[in-house]
Image (spheres, coloured by chain):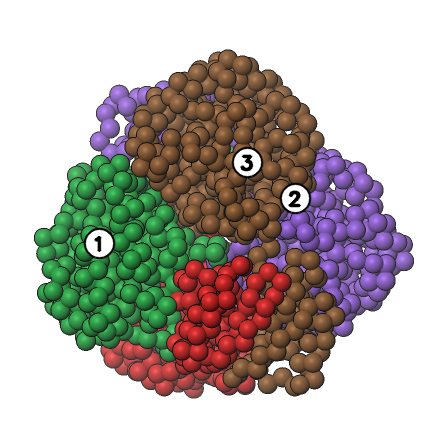
Chain colours: A purple, B brown, C green, D red
């Protein structure tokens, strides 16, 4: 921690700060500058009590942490890339994985048609929401367990592992019984009880970035998974909330190199939620792959205009086939498969 | 819904849109303008399927909802101000209520000293966290049930009703057994399963605004409480996330007149989380009261620099007394008690 | 500056950093911590070259400035509140000043009616735009010099000093010839050439906060005025840009206590631009006054629905009279006149 | 325009709105819905007076424009991609152009070394700042005309056309005498007087996106260039301001497909300002190229740690050579040269 004192304080006020720093277990280093005195407090910030409350002392101008607060997700802790495997599909390896399927599971016919089509086009994992978090209580909330059963059936028929959202601690066992990967949605990204419940199922967990989550906070939320003895963590960027209204969210592709520098955990990009517009999905996928994404999560629907949720951002079955063909040269250019 | 078509589309493309609008149960009104054709789709947007997926059609430029999506929280539904009562303390009436206490319950001594002091200074409700949502898994997570028991003890000794946070569906019954008001934190503001669980306890629910929640989304989250047969809803602004780094959050006081215009639900302001700095609390409280807030939620600690969480934003016992004295003329000017 | 080195670097890499720090004129203090080495670089950051480029060195994790970069606007430089006087009207003293008038000067009749009415209601300064910055080149750009002449005429008739916007370096002499206070708009808040030109006229300058300007950047932009020998600086908050779409901007009232703590310069609040909605103006004014604003800047128009610009946020002449009556008890509660 | 009336208003209140719509030259279409009446006002919103002031009427709930406000930058106005030529270098054609050079021109030696090196590595345009807009008045403000002369000399020696920033109307002729492309910085992106002055020089204009500029506002700012008879417009994304603090800005690559859909104007990406970190530049360039950027603007310096401005984001001469080699396969995958 770096504690900056206000100008013109007395020696006694300074001593009080130094004493408090020692009391909390840190070693103070005093640096007297031109205008201000600065105190470096040496000690492990992740195990000692925080010095941040000192900021409320009248003689203190600011308190700044210098250590990163995440441990297990850090590349320092695990210098090589980690991989996550779901029914034999490896995410984080040489092959770029494509997770595709409808926003919501609506019916057997809708899901099967989509599953078969996305598999044929090259998808390697099937996505589909059975439990849906909706902004309004009057919107379609998902088919629930019936949706999970349909997903399991689609898996039997296509062999694709399935990813589906977990949104209640109380559903953790149920959803884990069917799903190969549990998805934690953006609105639950700091629902820490849910993160712990998801981790404890032992299934891989795809953690979406919250709408206004700083990268450090996202990494720390991921820490909740690893710290609960589940190594199957995936980070998924799905757009952040900004002032821009043209798109539903602003897809922040810069997280790809940043998370790769800071962490060993694979990175997934969701261009569908990330933009809210099907017409932007192809370009975002190209960029994501060129920048090193390990997987894409794409919403596909046989008839988007009749989708029960988020129709505007889902691509058609034909559109998905075209998209997959389009991406090939970029996957090659990125040295991936 | 208002559907704007792209310029220069064919009559056939237009007809397809009109047919879809009818199919989903709306009555289309076609308006041919200078550059574009616009279709008004008349029908109740809250009960019909959404027309938003039309936005993915190539001939459609935009689809804009015109109805407000919230019903029960709306002032249309309940033209007079509603009030919420917790152990005889009425929030939303003439009297401005002051909820005060420590960020976290840390010990009997810390809580009792604070409870007695805030009561003496004029607080009418005691706050204190027993379960704490923390950005990092390595930070203090609260005393849990032991904290709840201490809160109950403080209530017995001071007579103040208590408000404390609920952060897991699984704790709903436990927390409701002790608390007079359940608090839903900003990071759980769109954890809809938790909202439903909270509503079902029958206890009043204070719903904090999420870090990047639009006002409409906040009102809709409140709708989850009312739609689950719990009329005891309170909205609490605690600062939104912006680009500014001087304060921890940007406390958006404009929500006071806005929520008062749109809704009948009482409005509470939390200046402690809202700024993250104890030195700004007094000014924010003055503004909140002048603008019509029904209650304030203020963090108070006997020794903020040794607080186990968020010390920088907690005011001292003496500071709280001074604050209460300071607010009196503004409460009067606002025509409140 | 605080330079944090990456973990596990060699002594030689550390030495290179230390050498560079000395080369740029700072004295390094080395603190070896548990996981990382931290170097405090002592020296005046405002006169020495910046150490921030060190952040691009591979062995450096972060570089953090510790000094505040503003000097003349700082309360350290001028511990008492400063005041700004325009034709005898003192801003920053005991009296809260009210600047009111139309968004744009449209005609003699519109301006005179407004000027007379706002004076009668208690306004002490007349506002009105003669040169208007407009998002689109096809919108009304103001009456130009003709507008300035009308403002001068309104001043003759009412005695109210006038404030009007300066938006081009080339107009500085012209606008300063007529205006008593020059207004710099949000979109020009970091148009430093314009700030210098405004400062050099010698007239007081009201500097609006830019749409996404951090408070520190705003204070530094004000520094351009004071550093060019013009002590007549006013800071004006007019709403920042956030994700919220209900209001045009998010009026950040927390700047009142913050600027008062950091600086000696008077603070003005513009609730009209700040919300974009006339129906919110009264509540925002109440809050601003309770929190210690030195002046308000309010848009008033005889017939807002026919205004040539920003009609939705202008209050009527009657509305303004009512507003002024409404504010009286809050001005008293704040200990102002 | 779509005018939504409040529920339960009288027929007389409705008639007043309809009369006002007609008065301003629009044709009203009345649609009576379940809960509300909606009026479509047909007429050209870009030539008629705005109906937005109606939003301040008590019986009106909202007023929503439906037309896009930009004309000349619109792809409707110019369906094929436009190209901009600077000394024979064509931007917007098949070839991806690389603009590279130092943030600031500091000395002849620094500039010449950089110019020769970037040309050798494949850059086709030389960038360098002679006039620098700086947040603080105490920071290096650029060499001014001396810098322009050095740029001209570098052009003579390497044959590379030059791009440099214009930040004052008063410098327009001077800068245009030396520069092949004028750059308008983010902080001046809505300094409309400067846009007009830049347009009138007849030189191509690269318009950076403002820090919190919506895409529509950016396109409208570009409209100021085209409407002033200068067809040489380039849009340049350089990162927007968000809540994230890990990077200096959030580089919004989604603008590439969006501007390509809405407009015919070439798109340039600036990954240096966009991230503020040299270590992220390569990944951002890969993404930009894959997504269809027409040019990149990259800061390169022989010795970033001694740069007089923005050292942390400048890549070294060797780093730039490596970057150019790295990009080749992505340029090919994108079907560009």
- Image location (x, y in percent) of residue B256: 43, 45
Q: Secondary structure at mark 1?
A: helix
Residue B51 horizontal side relative to residue A111, left or right? left
Helix, strand or loop at label 2? It is loop
User: At numbered mark 3, what does the secondary structure look like: helix, strand or loop?
Assistant: strand
Q: CA distance from mark 2 to mark 1?
A: 46 Å
**Which residue appears at 55% of the width and 19% of the height?**
B151
Mark 2: give few (<14), some (14-19) or many (20+) Cα within 10 Å: some
Asked which quadrant contains residue A103, the reply is bottom right
Mark count: 3
Pointer 3 or 2: first along the chain: 3
Which percent across, then down, holds residue D65?
A: 49, 71
Q: Is residue C201 above or below residue B144?
A: below
Q: Are marks 2 and 1 in contact (CB under 8 Å)?
A: no
Say whether marks 3 and 2 touch (CB < 8 Å).
Answer: no
Q: What is the distance, in whole Å, between disc 1 and disc 3 at their CAs?
A: 41 Å
The numbered mark at residue B206 is 3
Q: Residue furthest right?
A: A157
| Residue at (49% x, 73% y) in the render | D1
Chain identifier of the residue bearing label 3 in the image: B
Residue D190 left/right relative to C200: right
x, y percent for residue D310 = 37, 57
- Residues C244 and D336: in front is C244
The residue singled out by tag 1 in the image is C121
């Amino acid at each position: 921690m770096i504690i900056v004192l206000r100008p013109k304080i007395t020696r006694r006020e300074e001593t009080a700060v130094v004493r408090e720093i020692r009391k909390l277990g840190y070693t103070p280093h005093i640096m007297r500058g031109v205008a201000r005195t600065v105190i470096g407090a040496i000690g492990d910030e992740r195990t000692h009590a925080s010095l941040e409350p000192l900021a409320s002392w009248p003689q203190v101008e600011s308190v700044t942490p210098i250590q990163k607060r995440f441990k297990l997700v850090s590349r320092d802790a695990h210098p090589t890339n980690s991989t996550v495997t779901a029914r034999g599909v490896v995410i984080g390896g040489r092959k770029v994985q494509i997770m595709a399927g409808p926003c919501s599971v609506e019916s057997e016919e809708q899901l099967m048609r989509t599953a078969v089509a996305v598999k044929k086009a090259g998808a390697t994992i099937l996505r589909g929401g059975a439990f849906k978090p909706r902004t309004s209580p009057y919107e379609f909330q998902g088919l629930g367990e019936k949706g999970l059963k349909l997903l399991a059936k689609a898996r039997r028929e296509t062999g694709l592992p399935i990813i589906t959202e977990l949104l209640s601690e109380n559903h953790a066992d149920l959803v884990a019984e069917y799903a190969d990967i549990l998805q934690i949605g953006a609105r639950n990204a700091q629902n820490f009880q849910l993160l712990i419940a998801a981790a404890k199922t032992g299934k891989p967990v795809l953690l979406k970035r919250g709408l206004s989550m700083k990268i450090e906070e996202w990494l720390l939320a991921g820490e909740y998974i690893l710290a609960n003895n589940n190594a199957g963590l995936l980070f998924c960027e799905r757009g952040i909330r900004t002032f821009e209204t043209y798109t539903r969210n602003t897809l922040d592709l810069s997280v790809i190199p940043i998370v790769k520098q800071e962490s060993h955990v694979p990175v997934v990009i969701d261009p569908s939620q990330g933009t809210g517009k099907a017409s932007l999905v192809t370009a975002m996928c190209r960029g994501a792959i060129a920048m090193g994404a390990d997987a894409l999560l794409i919403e596909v629907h046989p008839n988007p205009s009749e989708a029960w949720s988020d129709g505007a951002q889902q691509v058609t079955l034909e559109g998905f086939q075209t998209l997959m063909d389009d991406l090939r040269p970029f996957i090659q250019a990125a040295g991936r498969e």
